[in-house]
Image (cartoon, grey):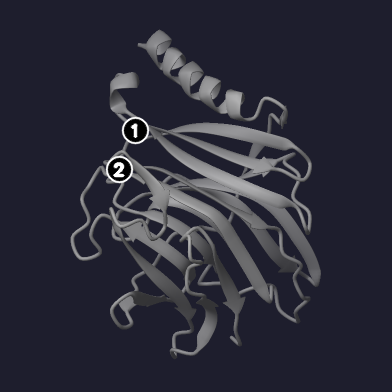
């Protein structure tokens, strides 16, 4: 069984290495991250918009009212590391792509964080396989202006004997031509209901104040659902935009309409 799992991992890495053969692989150490990144109950605002206390961006599902389980197999997206403004209080912001989290008990996600602690901005990469803990990717470079892309890829159970679902998470810094890959197995029933492209106010003893970033553009946003690969607005599935609001309903960040090709949008910081 161990040998078959090793073969499955080698198969995954082989496909990814071909795509990144002119980039340098970074072997990162993992450090537990105190923040948690997953969605909290949200409500619908009109026909195709939701609001959330901690998410802003887009969600894609086979059907928004009754999404098909085990349908999402891959999600990818890119963004530019934003510059952030200092604040009198500590703030946090996470940009990520992932599978699940909207109406499911697990989240498989990878991205970057942009926090301000004691007036100092910190930019770093991380991943989370909720309900397992979140981890920082120590040694992966993240600086303002860097072009980042991230992928979350489900590996079919037929390649991984035994309990659990295997996911391979990859993050790439195109500016510095470096990448790292994280294989991870979740033993809970992973529904794979949704694909997400999200800017988030993470949770640490409550939803943290959102870092002031002005504008974050996400682009090259692609999902694979039921074997079909396409942009967020692919007609083979449905999508929802999601705006972040305070407990009183005041806007914290707003997602723009999708670009014509459905692969890009912006998240605009608003007063919180």
Mark 2 residue element: loop
Mark 1 residue element: strand
Q: In the picture shown, does residue 13 fall above or below 222?
A: above
Residue at (22%, 47%) from the top-left corner?
69
- The residue lying toward the viewer, choosing from 205 and 56, is 56
Q: Position of residue 154 (x, y in %)?
A: 39, 35
Q: Is residue 155 left or right of residue 97?
A: left
Please give the residue where the numbered disc 2 appears in the rendered image.
190
Residue 141 in view: yes
Residue at (29%, 51%) from the top-left corner?
193
Q: Is mark 1 in CB contact (under 8 Å) with mark 2? A: yes
| Real-space Cα separation, disc 1 to disc 2, in angstroms | 7 Å
For the image shown, how many numbered marks are present on the structure?
2
Please give the residue where the numbered disc 1 appears in the rendered image.
165
Q: State which tag comes first along the sequence, 1 or 2.
A: 1
Q: Position of residue 244 (x, y in %)?
A: 48, 77
Residue at (46%, 77%) from the top-left corner?
243
Q: In the picture shown, does residue 179 fall above or below 195?
A: above
Which residue occupies the extreme right position in the image?
A: 120
- The residue lying toward the viewer, choosing from 193 and 115, is 193
- Residue density around tag 2, few if under 14, some if 14–19, many if 20 or more, within 10 Å: some
Q: Position of residue 199 (x, y in %)?
A: 55, 65
Residue at (76%, 67%) from the top-left corner?
83
Residue 134 in view: no
């Amino acid at each position: 069984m161990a040998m078959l799992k090793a073969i499955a991992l080698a198969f995954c890495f082989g496909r990814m290495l071909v795509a990144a053969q002119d980039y340098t692989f970074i072997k990162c150490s993992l450090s537990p991250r105190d923040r948690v990144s997953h969605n909290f109950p949200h409500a619908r605002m009109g026909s195709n918009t939701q609001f959330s206390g901690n998410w802003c961006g887009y969600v894609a599902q086979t059907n928004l009212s009754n999404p098909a389980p085990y349908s999402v197999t891959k999600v990818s997206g890119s963004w530019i590391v934003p510059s952030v403004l200092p604040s009198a209080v500590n703030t946090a912001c996470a940009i990520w792509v992932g599978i699940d989290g909207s109406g499911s008990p697990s989240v498989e996600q990878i991205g970057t964080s942009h926090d301000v602690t004691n007036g100092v901005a910190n930019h770093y990469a991380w991943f989370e396989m909720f309900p397992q803990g979140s981890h920082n990717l120590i040694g992966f470079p993240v600086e303002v202006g860097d072009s980042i892309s991230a992928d979350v890829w489900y590996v079919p159970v037929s390649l991984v004997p035994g309990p659990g679902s295997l996911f391979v998470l990859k993050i790439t810094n195109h500016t510095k031509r470096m990448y790292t890959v994280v294989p991870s197995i979740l033993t809970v029933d992973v529904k794979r209901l949704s694909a997400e492209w999200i800017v988030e106010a993470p949770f640490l003893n409550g939803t943290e104040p959102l870092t002031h970033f002005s504008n974050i553009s996400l682009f090259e946003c692609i999902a694979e659902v039921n074997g079909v690969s396409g942009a967020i607005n692919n007609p083979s599935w449905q999508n929802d935009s999601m705006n972040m609001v305070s407990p009183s309903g005041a806007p914290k960040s707003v997602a723009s309409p999708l670009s014509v090709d459905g692969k890009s949008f912006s998240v605009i910081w608003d007063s919180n």
